[in-house]
Amino acid sequence: MTEFERDLVHSFNEYFKEKKIRGISYRLKQHRFTSQFLDVLVDSLNPDYYLGIECKSISVDKGTKALYFTQHFTTDKKGVHQIDRISDFLKCSGRRGYLAVELRYGVGHSREAYAIPWKDIDGRFHSESLKFTIEEISAYPSILRGKSDYHVEPDVWGVD
């Protein structure tokens, strides 16, 4: 589990506790030769918080200019792309999906993270576009970060 995934899980669980919402966020253990559906799952009786979140972390300080569908996502042995696998899982499970993208700017600079609705990821992928630029990612709702962790804000996740 990456630090970003761990922070996101912790942030959702703290939010649920603070707001007294019945819900839990977690990450399933990933086994070496099996693919996982998503990085973070959020379960709640409140359907607004029935989410599936894929996390990607991009090192902008090392020159990455975009999130590339070929470089940052995988294709399985059967040739099925990770975006299609996630889209199928979200459709079958009824979860709302998001791609949480963390932009790392290097030592001495704070990180930024953004939540992109999965329908936008799937739509862009099937339009045969190869990427989301850093500028495009930054136009999506920001996942607020404190000194050491992220904070769940309902409007970022499409919650009323």
Image (tube, rainbow, N blue to C red):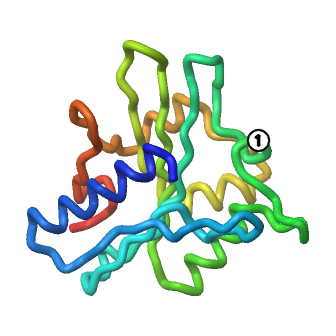
Image height of 5 relative to 52, above or below: above
Point out residue 101 in the picture as x, y percentages from the top left corner. Answer: 50, 43
**SS at badge 1:** loop
Which quadrant would residue 92 be assigned to in this image?
bottom right
Residue that numbered label 1 is attached to: 71
Point out residue 125 in the picture as x, y percentages from the top left corner. Answer: 71, 55
Point out residue 102 in the picture as x, y percentages from the top left corner. Answer: 47, 38
Image height of 48 relative to 136, above or below: below
Number of on-image labels: 1
Q: Residues within 10 Å of mark 1 (few under 14, many from 20)?
A: few
Which residue does the image show at 52% across and 29% down from the upper left?
Answer: 135
What amino acid type should be assigned to the residue bearing mark 1? Gln
Q: Which residue is farthest top?
A: 108
Which quadrant would residue 41 be assigned to in this image?
bottom left
Image height of 150 relative to 105, above or below: below
Which residue does the image show at 56% across and 23% down from the upper left?
Answer: 60
Point out residue 78 in the picture as x, y percentages from the top left corner. Answer: 90, 71
- Which part of the image, by quadrant, shows the C terminus? bottom left
Specify whether 59 is left or right of 76.
Answer: left
Specify whether 30 is left or right of 139.
Answer: right
Which residue does the image show at 31% across and 53% down from the upper left?
Answer: 156
Specify whether 75 is left or right of 89.
Answer: right
Q: Work out whether residue 133 or residue 15 is closer to the camera in this orientation and state it.
A: 15
